[in-house]
Amino acid sequence: MSKFGLERLGATLFACAILLAACATTGKSTVGDGELATSSDQTSAQKRAAINLQLAVGYYQRNEFEVALDKIKQSLLADPDYAEAYSMRGLIYMQMNETHLADENFQHALKLGPNNGEFSNNYGWFLCQNGRAAESIAYFDAAVKARNYPAPAKALDNAGMCSLKLNDHAAAERYFLRAFQVDPGNTKVNANLARMYYERQDYEHAKFYIGRVIKSDVHDADVLWLGAKIAHKMGDRMTESAIGTQLQRYQPNSLEYASYQREAFDE
């Protein structure tokens, strides 16, 4: 899975977050002084909006984007200020490569929910993936600072990846290490740290982080191949061979396993 499938994985996780939110509330987040809204506080229109959003998420996850867009339309007809629906529509348009429409919807979601960390993180990721990495960092920082945002490591990791696109390796290292401090078991963060240190030829640190990933039973071809290359650089033939066996078992048809068979460790 190229680059750990981050783009699609991030989109899927965002859709799951949207789905969970839809089950509990709509864009209106409170009903009184400090009291969170619950399903019992929703009007019938808001409930229709939430149900249609849940349906949209399901269709999105099956790559049925046109049907998903129709469900979003029904959701917004019921509740025109439903911020999560705009975020979901932005995500759908992003996957459809409708960049302008995605941008409009992400921005509208942020207008309705300016302190929502998930909205900030995902708009930042959209910007980063569309040639605007320099603009994205501020949104990741906002996500990390947002109250009640449950996934700061995700935003920090994204900020690190986008810093690399800007060739700001010092900032990337800071973001990745902060993400590791927040969530040391996060395999994406550990893999990104391993790759960064490998490319810096700091093989000791790279070995530490890739070891944490492989121990987590991650079998992605690019992760295993990175582990094999690090072991090769360290002269650890036993680990190199063991990882090669995993490549053969789990990724026998991958380009990475073909590279391993050719002993193309320096390509």
Image (cartoon, grey):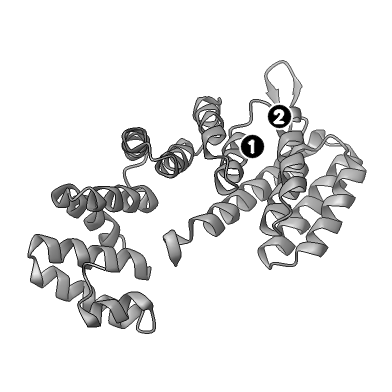
Question: Residue 252, image x and y in percent?
Answer: 35, 84
Q: Position of residue 3 (x, y in %)?
A: 43, 59
**Of the numbered discs in the image, which one, if any, rests on residue 113?**
2
Q: Residue at x 57, y 40 (%)?
A: 132
What residue is shown at x 83% (from left), y 36% (from top)? 42
Left or right of 194 in this view: 88: right
**Residue 177 visible to the viewer:** yes
Q: Could you say where residue 38 lies in the image, as x and y percent from the top left?
A: 73, 35
Question: Which of 86 and 230 lies nearest the eye of the viewer?
Answer: 230
Q: Is residue 155 above or below residue 35?
A: below
Give the quarter of the image for residue 67: bottom right
Left or right placement of residue 124 versus residue 18 in this view: left
Where is mark 1, residue-wise?
119
Residue 100 vertical placement versus 181 (above, below):
below
Q: Nearer the viewer, residue 38 or 105?
A: 105
Residue nearest the observer in this picture, 119 or 47: 119
